[in-house]
């Protein structure tokens, strides 16, 4: 291995590896590498000052006695906290760790790896500071309580400019988001739901352009009915897909008007809304649902055998398959293509067409913060989806490139500015800025973050990961397979 960038991992595997072996090897490598890298660096985030310390008396400015004036000024005008502290650019990443990726309930501290990851992406891609907060939402019986998360967020909201909810299981996630969106004075965003819906819509917009199918004419199957797919359905319908052309599967079958189990469990009110508008023919089997479907969006349990190739064979010509479970897609891309899929996307960056909320949430939150929006509306998420899709189209879209990637750094200030303009149009912005102003500030903050990380790497404050350890992990993975 010549460098620690992890480029061309597949070239290090034996040449006689099958596609399935390569897919398994990559999954195992990234998991092993993740443990090793997190252990080597002790996590991936730290806290540093943003203001200078020129000498001893500057401590008297930044702390006592000078800082007393800051406290009393904010006491008399709470909004002053947005320009006298870092609050205007600070996000809390809040999770009870009850649904961490595809691994389920990982206990409160088990979510720290993902929440730190969110914080890292938010800073590097969006120039937004954030803090991971993994909390215990259990009562004395060990049951996870939505009210505990709601109360916690309402208590800490005055220290932050926005809240990013993450990895909270259903049905609690629905009430937590809907309650906090209305009762908090700052925007509350559920990235698993709204973020995933935004990027999925963006990918779908471009995939449909490539296959030449209007959104209003498509038949779509959504496999999985958690926070992500229920929100995806809502945004798809708002953006032009006909509700009657959607068929949604949960663990018990399809959603439809006769699902009294969902109707009678008021915690699943979001699913019941979809039961009343989608699948009017009450189709129940995968064979019926997949027949002549143009699109499959799977966000269910990790595969690789959750989605059957024979189902994909039933789909329409030039079918689109999004298999986005993490860390293993519901069906591997090569199998989906063998079964006839024309465009295949996953949630992973080591396959073509990564549909992952990492390309939206840093920018959406940045744009939201820069106009001090009070909430993130569905219209803002849809605007972000079209902004992402338009950015990719200008670069050139194809069967294997329907989305921008996290390395397209100019994507994020563009999306931030578009989202900010939508917030102003929706009447939720407290501050008015022009598109160019938002774009310029976001560019500056993102560029400075990149330069600081490069400086730390060059100076050795961030140590290079040992090359020999990478090779050792590769050898272990190959030996096991």
Image: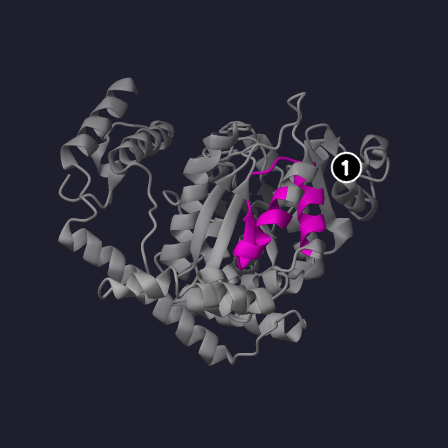
Q: Residue at (53%, 55%) from the top-left corner?
A: 159
Above or below for 291 versus 13: below
Residue indicated by mark 1 = 267
Q: Residue at (80%, 34%) from the top-left corner?
A: 262
Q: Position of residue 356 (x, y in %)?
A: 48, 48
Q: Is residue 14 visible?
A: no
Q: Nearer the viewer, residue 295 or 291?
A: 295
Q: Residues within 10 Å of mark 1 (few under 14, many from 20)?
A: some
Secondary structure, mark 1, is helix
Q: Locate residue 252 relative to residue 206 in the image: left or right.
A: right
Q: Nearer the viewer, residue 436 or 237?
A: 436
Tell me if residue 346 is in the magenta stretch.
no
Q: Which residues are magenta?
A: 152-181
Q: Locate residue 444 relative to residue 68 in the image: left or right.
A: left
Q: Locate residue 362 relative to residue 19 in the image: left or right.
A: right
Q: Position of residue 372 (x, y in %)?
A: 56, 68
């Amino acid at each position: 291995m010549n460098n620690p960038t992890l480029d061309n991992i597949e070239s290090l595997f034996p040449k006689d590896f099958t596609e399935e072996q390569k897919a398994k090897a990559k999954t195992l490598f990234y998991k092993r590498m993740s443990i090793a890298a997190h252990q080597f660096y002790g996590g991936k985030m730290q806290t540093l000052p943003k203001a200078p310390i020129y000498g001893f008396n500057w401590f008297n400015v930044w702390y006592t006695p000078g800082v007393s004036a800051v406290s009393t000024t904010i006491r008399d005008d709470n909004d002053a906290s947005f320009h006298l502290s870092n609050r205007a650019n600070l996000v809390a990443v809040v999770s009870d760790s009850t649904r961490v990726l595809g691994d389920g309930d990982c206990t409160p501290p088990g979510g720290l790896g993902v929440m730190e990851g969110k914080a890292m992406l938010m800073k590097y891609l969006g120039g937004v500071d954030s803090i991971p907060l993994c909390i215990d939402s259990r009562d004395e019986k060990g049951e996870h309580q939505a009210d505990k998360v709601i109360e916690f967020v309402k208590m800490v909201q005055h220290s932050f400019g926005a809240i990013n909810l993450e990895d909270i299981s259903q049905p609690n996630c629905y009430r937590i988001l809907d309650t906090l969106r209305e009762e908090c004075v700052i925007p509350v965003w559920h990235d698993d739901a709204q973020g995933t819906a935004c990027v999925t819509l963006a990918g779908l917009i471009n995939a449909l352009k490539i296959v030449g199918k209007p959104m209003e004419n498509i038949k779509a199957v959504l496999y999985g009915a958690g926070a992500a797919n229920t929100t995806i359905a809502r945004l798809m319908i708002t953006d032009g897909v006909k509700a009657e052309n959607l068929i949604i599967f949960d663990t018990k079958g399809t959603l439809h008007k006769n699902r009294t189990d969902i109707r009678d469990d008021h915690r699943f009110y979001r699913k019941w809304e979809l039961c009343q508008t989608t699948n009017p023919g009450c189709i129940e089997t995968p064979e019926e649902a997949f027949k002549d479907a143009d699109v499959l969006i799977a966000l269910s349990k990790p595969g690789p055998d959750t989605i059957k190739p024979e189902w994909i064979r039933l789909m329409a010509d030039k079918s689109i398959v999004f298999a986005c479970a993490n860390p293993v897609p519901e069906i591997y891309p090569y199998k989906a293509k063998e079964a006839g899929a024309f465009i295949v996307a996953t949630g992973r960056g080591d396959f073509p067409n990564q549909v992952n909320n990492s390309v939206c949430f840093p920018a959406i939150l940045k744009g939201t913060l820069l106009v001090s929006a009070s909430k993130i509306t569905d219209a803002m998420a849809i605007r972000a989806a079209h902004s992402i899709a338009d950015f990719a189209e200008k670069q050139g879209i194809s069967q294997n490139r329907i989305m921008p990637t996290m390395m397209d750094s100019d994507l994020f200030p563009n999306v931030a500015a578009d989202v900010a303009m939508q917030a102003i149009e929706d009447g939720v912005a407290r501050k008015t800025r022009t598109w160019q102003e938002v774009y310029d500030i976001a560019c500056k903050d993102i560029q400075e973050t990149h330069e600081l990380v490069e400086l730390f790497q060059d100076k050795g404050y961030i140590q290079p990961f040992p090359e020999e350890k990478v090779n050792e992990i590769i050898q272990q993975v190959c030996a096991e397979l």
